[in-house]
Amino acid sequence: MDTVAWGAAAVTAAAVAGVLRGLDVRLVLLAAALALGAIAGDLKPDVGQFLRTFSDEKFVVPICTAMGFAYVLRATGCDAHLVRVLVAPLRRVRWLTVPGVVAAGFLVNVPVISQASTAVCLGTVAVPLMRAAGFSPTTVGATLLLGCSVGGELLNPGAPELNSVSEAAGGDPRAVVPDVARLIGPMLAVSGAAFWLLSRRDRPGVVEPAAAPAEASGRLNPLKAAVPLVPLALLFLSGPPLDLVAVAPEWVGAAPGGREVNSRLIGLAMLLGTLAAAAVSGRAAKGCMKAFFEGAGYGFTNIVSLIVTANCFGRGIEQAGLARHLGDLIAAAPGLLHPLAGFVPFAFAWVCGSGMASTQSLYGFFHGPAVQLGADPLAVGALVAVGSAAGRTMSPVAAVVFMCATLSGARGPDLVKRVAGPLILGLTTVVLLRTFGVL
């Protein structure tokens, strides 16, 4: 590597150290991006990247509307009713409590998308249930963390990660879902099984059942339980391979074939889900739009901001030549494409605490080499997204880790330690299967 590349490597190492010392991730990434630009001799690309991403609707619309919908589900209690449907069998089969809660978190995360919101929703039911079964706070929090963050949202065509991959590859977000499904299944099976085995050391004691939390009391409303699935259904029905519902571009204020159609369609789906929640929520409907915009604000503050600064950092890495060296390495050793596509985003998400930011800022580094080697860029993008989700799940600065620690009364670092081994084992399995052509 040349002098600029070595300087960029030093800045990257300093950024990692700053995050681990507890500095604000966004501040560290932006400062590192500017330092990388200075090393390369031109700050304009980094500043321009900040402003482009800050105002790019392909991030703002899907993320903010998805978070707005998540807030509406919480405000109306629709998410709690869905959780009750999924968790009800676990009250009768307690030896399946750990894998059952993991599976429930994964399934709830598909329509809700936000990991922290999924944890809040599931935690109100699962935490008392697991405590009543005698599990320790660490096991309770780690079970919640693994299920809510391992990657369920990647099966939702509205997930911003899929939009990032499809945008770069010139496809449709819904076309990435099958590739993700082939990877996330083995990832969940291996990491979930390993975690379950580790949790057997924490044997449930004979404890009286805890009282049901307020959110889970009252009569189950099947209409409310179905509301979280409304946007998901629209996105699946309106895209490949089903294509059963045609949405005119005029509904999303876009020109036919425009690049903004996909992101705005996600926004439309979330808006329809909000209207459905209002329709079945009686008096609670009056607060739906306020909750929607509060969630949108949260999404911009805590997710879009990370993507903005991570994109700047990624642009700085590219400008300093590290991305080129990565491409040269893959070209010289094609067998490294899939291992690097899985573990580099994994490491970056572990540092920054965001799977979305990691996927968006790093996928471009692998898209070009994948095309040159004749690999399917969408399949490589799916691996980048799955690796990013795994890294986020064991990141000490991820919002979902803080949320699960708060709900369970455990320490965040203890939760990270408990899920780290299973996640690394799961990702390693997936990478090996993809490398040898099994997946």
Image (cartoon, rainbow, N blue to C red):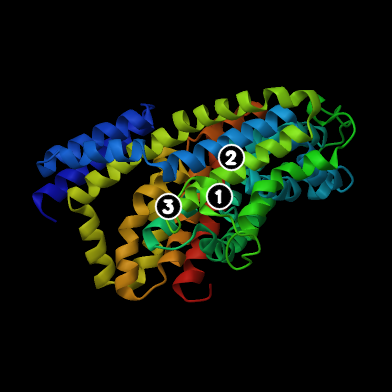
Q: Nearer the viewer, mark 3 or mark 2?
A: 3
Reading the chain from its start, which is encountered first: label 3 or label 2? 2
What residue lies at 50% left-to-right and 55% top-to-bottom? 386
Q: Residues within 10 Å of mark 2 (few under 14, many from 20)?
A: many
The N terminus - image quarter: bottom left
Q: Amino acid at mark 1?
A: Gly
- Which residue position is annotated with label 2? 115
Q: Is residue 217 visible?
A: yes
Residue visible at 18% across and 53% down in the picture:
321
The answer to whether residue 394 of the structure is visible from this angle is: no
Residue on which the image places disc 1: 158
Report helix, strand or loop for mark 2.
helix
Which residue is pictured at 73% across the width and 46% down the height?
98
Residues at badges 3 and 2 in contact (C-beta under 8 Å)?
A: no
Q: Secondary structure at mark 1?
A: loop
Please report whichever mark, 1 or 2, sits nearer to the chain's N-terminal start.
2
As drawn, the label of residue 164 is 3
Look at label 3 and name its amino acid. Ser
